[in-house]
């Protein structure tokens, strides 16, 4: 027992927690299964929700995410991100499903005031993909065997239930605090690396808290999965102070122009 445990202890001391969790996740669900499952879930999401018809807005959001994705490949190589804007002007939310599929609602684009705020939200979602949080969470909730079966089969009922859960509309265990912390750390890193002002993360939190007072229903899903808790805000303030981040681009005019059709 002691001998068997030794390599794991040794590995833990060499790696940070993220790497260990990625490896554990990798041992549970293969990248291939994650991608197969992600494709099936994406098809369900796009049945349940309506992708935005305005292709200029779709292209703009993809263009904002491209450099962020480039940085994230250092931490998790090989992911091909697919970003889709969902047409729902009331829903202020964004979410990631396994395999690199990321969704953002037009309501979130309306609530943001500049490109840096949008980039901050998207960088956080990419952080969840890098950490394989959705895949690991689904594995914990449904079991590896069922995920492998779903990835190969055509159980539309179960896949639909899962897709709704990932979009925040169904019953799904929320991301753990550790997952949120990790996604914030990755997100902060990518946002700063892309030259954005990371304080946009805080201005967006503040705006969400104001919106929540008048439109609690529209914010319910986002707040359930990504609560802007004092703990999160304090941690992001610490990251900003530590990085000495005193500026960066916001791209307000460019953002307003690119999303004008939604306003
Ligand atoms: Zn999150």
Image (spheres, rainbow, N blue to C red):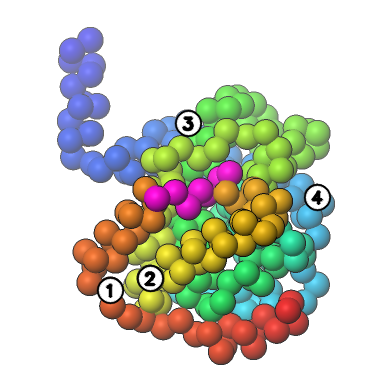
Residue identifier under label 2: 198
**Mark 1 or mark 4, earlier in chain:** 4
Residue identifier under label 1: 245
Residue 172 is a magenta residue: no
Counting from the top left corner in percent of width and height, residue 249 is at 41, 83
Do the residues under discs 1 and 2 have CB atoms within 8 angstroms? Answer: yes
Counting from the top left corner in percent of width and height, residue 72 is at 41, 62
Nearest to viewer (mark 4 / mark 3)? 4
Do the residues under discs 4 and 3 have CB atoms within 8 angstroms? Answer: no
Nearest to viewer (mark 3 / mark 1)? 1
Residue identifier under label 3: 28
The crowd level at tag 2 (other Cα within 10 Å; few <14, some 14-19, many 20+) is many
Residue depicted at 75% across the width and 66% down the height: 89
Q: Secondary structure at mark 4?
A: helix
**Mark 4 or mark 2, earlier in chain:** 4
Left or right, 211 with reference to 133: right
Q: Quadrant of residue 212?
A: bottom right
- Can residue 68 be seen? no
Left or right, 85 with reference to 48: left
Residue identifier under label 4: 48
**Mark 4 or mark 3, earlier in chain:** 3
Q: In the rendered structure, which segment of residues is drawn in magenta?
A: 224-230
Residue in the foreground of this view, choosing between 132 and 198? 198
**Residue 59: assigned label:** none
């Amino acid at each position: 027992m002691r001998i068997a445990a030794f390599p794991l202890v040794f590995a833990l001391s060499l790696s940070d927690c993220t790497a260990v969790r990625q490896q554990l996740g990798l041992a549970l669900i293969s990248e291939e299964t994650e991608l197969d499952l992600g494709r099936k879930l994406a098809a369900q999401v796009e049945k349940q929700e309506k992708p935005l018809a305005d292709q200029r807005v779709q292209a703009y959001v993809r263009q904002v995410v491209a450099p962020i994705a480039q940085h994230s490949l250092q931490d998790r190589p090989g992911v091909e991100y697919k970003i889709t804007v969902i047409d729902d002007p009331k829903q202020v939310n964004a979410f990631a499903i396994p395999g690199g599929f990321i969704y953002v609602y037009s309501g979130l684009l309306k609530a943001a005031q500049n490109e840096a705020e949008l980039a901050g939200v998207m960088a956080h979602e990419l952080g969840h993909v890098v950490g394989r949080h959705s895949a690991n969470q689904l594995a914990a909730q449904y079991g590896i065997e069922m995920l492998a079966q779903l990835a190969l089969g055509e159980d539309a009922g179960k896949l639909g239930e899962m897709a709704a859960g990932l979009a925040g509309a169904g019953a799904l265990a929320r991301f753990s605090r550790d997952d949120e912390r990790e996604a914030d750390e990755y997100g902060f890193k990518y946002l700063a690396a892309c030259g954005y002002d990371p304080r946009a993360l805080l201005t967006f939190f503040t705006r969400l808290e104001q919106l929540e007072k008048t439109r609690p229903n529209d914010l319910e899903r986002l707040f359930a999965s990504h609560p802007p808790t004092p703990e999160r805000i304090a941690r992001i303030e610490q990251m900003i102070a530590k990085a000495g981040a005193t500026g960066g681009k916001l791209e307000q005019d460019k953002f307003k122009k690119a999303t004008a059709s939604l306003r």
